[in-house]
Image (spheres, rainbow, N blue to C red):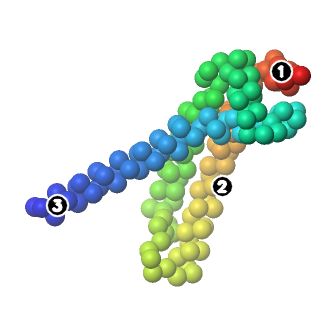
Amino acid sequence: MVICLLEQINRFAGFGIGLASLFTENVLAHPCIVLRRQCQVNYHAKNYHLTPFTIINIMYSINKTQGPRALWKGMGSTFIVQGIALGAEGIISEFTPLPREISYKWNPRQIGGHLTLKALTCIIAMPFYSASLIETVQVSFDFMYIFAYSFV
């Protein structure tokens, strides 16, 4: 009885930690990812972001032109892509002998099977990753003009 209760507590704690990790990875880090992609896409950004403190002006410009929700755009598609990737990995691992997890006593065949599983998952999810990437950097042409010349 006590062992069963401890197992349930451990499962619940593991689920909670996994959920908190997923939240942290997606919700809190997403604005940083969007900002990085915006700066990578904009050719003129390299002229204005020379020190770590110049990012404040870029963030202000994005907030001013696109609104405060601009740094969270594409977050819904990010969750969808992760769901597709996890679902594809789960389905492939259930219907094939490819291991989803590797034990601490691994061998080269397990590593190869696990890497094959990850490669198949990436192949299935890649079109969705691409669409999600485009959604996070998609901006209007007015913003590109304002962003390029707002620091001049």
Left or right of 121: which side holds 148? right
Residue 139 position, x and y percent, is: 75, 25
Compared with 54, 117 (above or below) is below
Could you tell me which residue is drawn at 49 percent across and 43 percent down?
Answer: 24
Could you tell me which residue is drawn at 53 percent across and 45 percent down?
Answer: 25
Identify residue type, mark 2: Ile
Q: What quarter of the picture does the N terminus occupy?
A: bottom left
Q: Which is nearer the eye, 65 or 116? A: 65
Compared with 12, 70 (above or below) is above
Question: How many residues crowd around disc 2 within 10 Å: few (fewer than 14), some, or many (20 or more)?
Answer: few
Left or right of 129: which side holds 97? left
Residue underneath mark 2: 123
Residue underneath mark 1: 150
Q: Is residue 80 visible?
A: no
Distance from the alpha carbon under mark 3 to that under mark 1: 62 Å
Q: Work out whether mark 2 precedes mark 3 in sequence or the reverse, and give the earlier one.
A: 3
Residue underneath mark 3: 4
